[in-house]
């Protein structure tokens, strides 16, 4: 939240007060006592807690380019929604390109604009009591998002004429305060707006509201093959620049950076390079007074942007 708005009124609240204000604490109708909601467990719980209260909870990120019957790469996510978002975006960054695009005089990340919305949607609107996993599958010609759903109106959604309906308002509201979610219905609008620039000549995206909410994002024919997972580690000279390029598209946690680089876990080398980039003032922390915060992210500085511009 501090990285999104350093004057956010929730920043100085005690933890319990924040949870209550954000809607994560409700009165239990059986006992009459306040208790944590399912949304609280999903957003902040340990993996064990989440599996206990929502056994069907899972996000499955799959790459199917060469092996369409099984997969070329796969990431199964069982952790809290804060880290799940970073891991899913890391998978997107690893396997999908990000073409250069100017909006006015500003360079923006089309990949981030489109897929942040879609990842936010499968997190914010998933039916968490369903045993079916939410999936993001990357094919050669498209990306498909499918998440368990309680349909409000069945059938294909017309982006120009639809009424958005909140499925998990507590989760959506909190993600909005963190800057990961704009407003109800923004996903369909932004994807429709930016997709023609991201995948010129490709068919329009489709959104279908049913027992599984399905979004299909057609891709241009020039999407690159994914890079070998060992590349970041085998070429340490380029790791600095790769991290700068990732952060140029937006703030990222260390988990998100690691996933985008194709690493299964945060490596010692990644920790070392991030420390050096901070010491060189090329990146900085979004929560500088709490370096070890689990909500810590990293962002590009003006000096880092200048260095990155000089590598093009």
Image: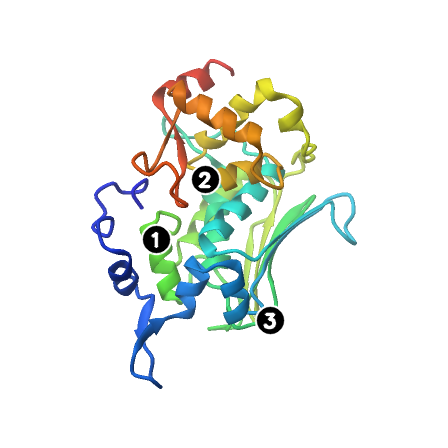
Q: CA distance from mark 3 to mark 1?
A: 26 Å
Residue beneath label 2, please?
253
Image position, residue 5 (x, y; %): 27, 42
Q: CA distance from mark 2 to mark 3?
A: 29 Å
Q: Quick one: SS at disc 2?
A: loop
From the viewer's perspective, is residue 210 above or below residue 248? below
Image position, residue 176 (x, y; %): 34, 53
Quarter of the figure with residue 131:
bottom right
Q: Residue at x 79, y 54 (%)?
A: 69
In the figure, is residue 252 to the left or right of 3? right
Which badge, 3 or 1, is on the more N-terminal residue? Answer: 3
Image position, residue 77 (x, y; %): 58, 54
Residue beneath label 1, please?
176
- Which of the pair 299/26 is nearer the observer? 26
Q: Quick one: SS at disc 1?
A: helix
Mark 2 nearby-residue class (10 Å; few <14, some 14–19, many ≥20): many
Image position, residue 224 (x, y; %): 67, 33
- Which of the pair 224/246 is nearer the observer? 246
State the residue lying farthest toward the bottom: 30
In the figure, is residue 1 to the left or right of 115? left
Q: Quick one: SS at disc 3?
A: loop
Which badge, 1 or 2, is on the more N-terminal residue? Answer: 1
Mark 3 nearby-residue class (10 Å; few <14, some 14–19, many ≥20): few
Q: Residue at x 51, y 64 (%)?
A: 50
Q: Residue at x 23, y 47 (%)?
A: 8
In the figure, is residue 43 to the left or right of 195? left
Mark 1 nearby-residue class (10 Å; few <14, some 14–19, many ≥20): some
Q: CA distance from mark 1 to mark 2?
A: 17 Å
Residue beneath label 3, please?
131
Which badge, 2 or 3, is on the more N-terminal residue? Answer: 3
Residues under numbered marks 3 and 1 in contact, where contact means CB atoms less than 8 Å apart = no
Q: Residue at x 25, y 40 (%)?
A: 6
């Amino acid at each position: 939240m501090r990285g999104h708005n350093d004057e956010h009124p929730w920043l100085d609240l005690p933890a319990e007060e924040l949870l209550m204000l954000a809607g994560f604490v409700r009165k239990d109708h059986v006992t009459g006592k306040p208790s944590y909601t399912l949304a609280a467990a999903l957003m902040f719980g340990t993996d064990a807690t989440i599996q206990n209260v929502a056994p069907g909870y899972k996000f499955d990120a799959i790459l199917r380019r060469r092996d369409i019957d099984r997969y070329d790469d796969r990431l199964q996510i069982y952790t809290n929604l804060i880290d799940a978002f970073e891991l899913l975006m890391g998978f997107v960054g690893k396997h999908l390109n990000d073409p250069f695009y100017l909006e006015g005089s500003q360079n923006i990340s089309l990949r981030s604009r489109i897929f942040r919305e879609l990842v936010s949607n499968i997190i914010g609107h998933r039916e968490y009591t369903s045993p079916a996993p939410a999936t993001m599958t990357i094919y050669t010609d498209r990306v498909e998002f499918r998440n368990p759903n309680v349909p409000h109106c069945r059938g294909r959604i017309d982006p120009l004429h639809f009424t958005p309906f909140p499925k998990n308002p507590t989760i959506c509201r909190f993600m909005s305060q963190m800057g990961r979610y704009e407003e109800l219905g923004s996903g369909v609008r932004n994807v429709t707006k930016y997709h023609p620039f991201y995948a010129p000549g490709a068919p329009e995206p489709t959104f279908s509201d049913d027992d599984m909410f399905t979004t299909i994002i057609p891709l241009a024919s020039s999407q690159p093959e994914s890079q070998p997972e060992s590349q970041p580690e085998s070429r340490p000279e380029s790791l600095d620049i790769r991290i700068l390029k990732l952060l140029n598209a937006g703030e990222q946690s260390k988990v998100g950076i690691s996933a985008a680089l194709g690493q299964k876990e945060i490596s010692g080398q990644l920790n070392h390079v991030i420390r050096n980039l901070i010491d060189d003032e090329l990146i900085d922390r979004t929560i500088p007074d709490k370096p070890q915060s689990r909500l810590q992210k990293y962002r590009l500085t003006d000096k880092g942007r200048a260095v990155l511009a000089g590598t093009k």
